Image (tube, grey):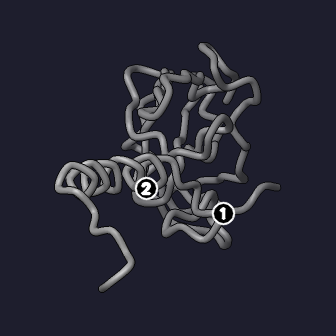
Amino acid sequence: MPGRPSASRRTVLRGAAVVPVAGLGVAACSSGADGGAVPPTPTAPVELGAESEVPKGGAKLYRDHNVVVSHAEDGSLKAYSTICTHAGCPINKLAGTTLTCPCHGSEFDARTGKVLHAPATEPLHELSVEARDGKIVAGPPA
């Protein structure tokens, strides 16, 4: 086109390199609450699995539902959303009873939902949970 300078090869390559990197940050930290594919918490009761899958004194991460369930020594269950309260990233790592967010390294206690390591400052959102006929059922906050 006359009158318009053409982009240099360097400009085109620089632009192509930046676009994929910029998109990665958005995809990695999408909370779902803003229109992403990951719902932050179950919107209706969801059967997660057998109660026996969660050891007493331990916890189990249900990645497909963004839920962690802990089983206290007294037999009681607790459930929390595994969407990080810092940037909305789905937490995908559970070691013992410590959840670690892949985006910025926040850590949470799976038994209490409390923050163990910043940058998150707010605890995980508690969900309702119960055992029905030996199956764990979690749902929206009580």
Which of label 1 and label 2 is nearer to you? 2
Q: Amino acid at mark 1?
A: Ala
Q: Decide: is 141 above or below 116.
A: below
Q: In front: 127, or 16?
A: 16
Q: CA distance from mark 1 to mark 2?
A: 13 Å
Q: Is residue 77 visible?
A: no
What residue is rendered at 51% in x and 53% in y?
66
> What residue is disc 2 on?
27
Relative to residue 79, is residue 68 drawn left or right?
Answer: left
Q: Is residue 142 visible?
A: yes
Q: Decide: is 85 above or below 39.
A: above
Q: Could you say whether the residue bearing mark 1 is in a helix, strand or loop?
A: loop
Give x and y (percent) for residue 116: 62, 14
Q: Residues within 10 Å of mark 1 (few under 14, many from 20)?
A: few
Q: Within the image, what quadrant is residue 126 found in?
A: top right
Relative to residue 52, is residue 57 drawn left or right?
Answer: right
Q: Residues within 10 Å of mark 2 (few under 14, many from 20)?
A: few
Q: Within the image, what quadrant is residue 139 found in?
A: bottom right
> What residue is disc 1 on?
33
Q: Quadrant of the C terminus?
A: bottom right
Q: Decide: is 17 above or below 135.
A: above
Q: Amino acid at mark 2?
A: Ala
Q: Within the image, what quadrant is residue 94 found in?
A: top left
Residue at the outermost left position: 9
Give x and y (percent) for residue 59: 47, 32
Residue at the outermost bottom position: 1
